[in-house]
Image (spheres, rainbow, N blue to C red):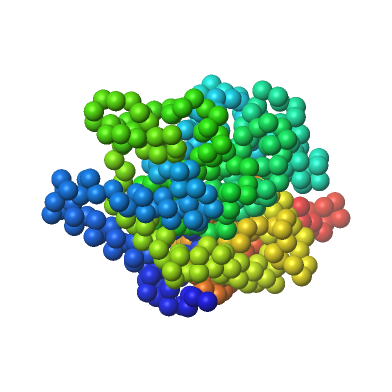
Amino acid sequence: MPDWAAVRETQFPGIAKHVSYLNTAVSGLMSRAAVAAVAEENEKWAADAATAVYNVSKLDEAREGLARMMGCDVGEVAITGNTTDGLNIACALLDTDAVALEDEFSSGPIAWMQAKHNVHFVTAAEVDALGGDILGALDAKLAATPTAKALLLSSVSYMDGHAVDLERAGAICAARGVDLVVDGSQSLGVEPLDLSKLNVAFLCGASYKWLCAGPGLGILFASASVLARLEPGAAPAAGWFGQAIDGRNYELNPHDDAQRFHYGTPNLTILAALCASLKLIDEEFGGVAGIAARNLELSSYMRGELLANGFSLMGAFGRSVAVTDDVDAAELQSSHITGVAIPFAEPKAVATALESEGIVVTAKDRHGVTGLRVACHIYNNTQDIDAFVGALAEIRDRMTAEAGAEAGAGTVEVETAGGAGQKL
């Protein structure tokens, strides 16, 4: 088992800047290994840029590492500029209407809208009508909209952390003749994944969240079976870097695998950081399974402390979850993101108050979610969680008291017919 205290101290010393950084769902802290890899790559550019630009061996290294992590063939992996690049590639190739949850992150639906396709949204009311069965509601929408041949779905919700059963989602899509397009931004590198066993057409993710490699790269899984049914070499764009032969010879001969989506020179500095991060995950963190186990340990502790201090946890669409002994129930949340209901004040005001005390989380107030999103990662510890829960309890008590005082100050005393004062 990794020594997580040593990992925190040696690889993530920047966390000491904060009292408690619980915001990896926005951006992950870069490891020292990733920072060093960026510096080394930049030194190559400072000394011999003409040689450095053609040294793309890290591209193959990263793709091979990602293929192992995702349980797929290396030919199904491409490096893009960001998550949204991958979603736009999927949209262009599938060329169809889509179904999505109304709290799906906007990148996917916007890509489909830009392409003049309809996106049919499943509402919270439709999910509630099926007893909270999210995938059942999506299946019903697919059945009602036969023109929609794509399902846009986040593996873990960016709003409240609820996780989706990708195996069941894939089975639904197979039965409906629909392609499953997954936004894996909130799960890639932190939740175990075996795409060889799942019916997923495309999965997209980013380097800067849970992989802790900094911004500038996207990860794209494009199923070989989906690519095989398309026109050979089909891609929404093209460039010299995506050709199976030297593209500088003006010959169009795109790769027959996901490498066709490599249009030009990749971000070599962040590519070096990504390779360093993947090596850490494999060699020092116990793989993604080790990371997931550590995050579950931290999140379980935090959920227990939140419940003990009178807070409620949020499930999908911000629904309150009744929890007794099992705070890690499958219907609750992922191993690393927790939604906390905040009924006593505006979530943004609470997040701002926490930030003033050096505690970083994210406020959410959309689609029925009124609370905080709290994200644990391997560089956190129980002291971070204690600081967060303690500060949140103090803020709740203070804001509740202030609201009560303001309500009391709003009363006036008038004289009744009998002469006695009455508060109104």
Residue drawn at (17%, 48%) of the image: 51
Residue 99 visible in the current orientation: no
Position of residue 131 measured from the top left corner of the image (x, y, whole percent): 81, 46
Establish if 344 lies above or below 83: below
Residue drawn at (39%, 69%) of the image: 12
Q: Is residue 53 left or right of residue 423?
A: left
Could you say which quadrant of the image residue 248 lies in? top left
* Nearest to the observer: residue 231 or residue 168: 231
Residue drawn at (82%, 56%) of the image: 419
* Nearest to the observer: residue 97 or residue 253: 253
Position of residue 13 measured from the top left corner of the image (x, y, whole percent): 37, 71
Position of residue 397 measured from the top left corner of the image (x, y, whole percent): 63, 67
* Nearest to the observer: residue 180 or residue 405: 180
Residue drawn at (76%, 34%) of the image: 140
Residue 52 visible in the current orientation: yes
Taking the view exactly as shown, the residue that stands out farthest to the left is 47
Q: Is residue 12 left or right of residue 418?
A: left
Position of residue 2 measured from the top left corner of the image (x, y, whole percent): 49, 75
Establish if 87 lies above or below 39: above
* Nearest to the observer: residue 225 or residue 272: 225
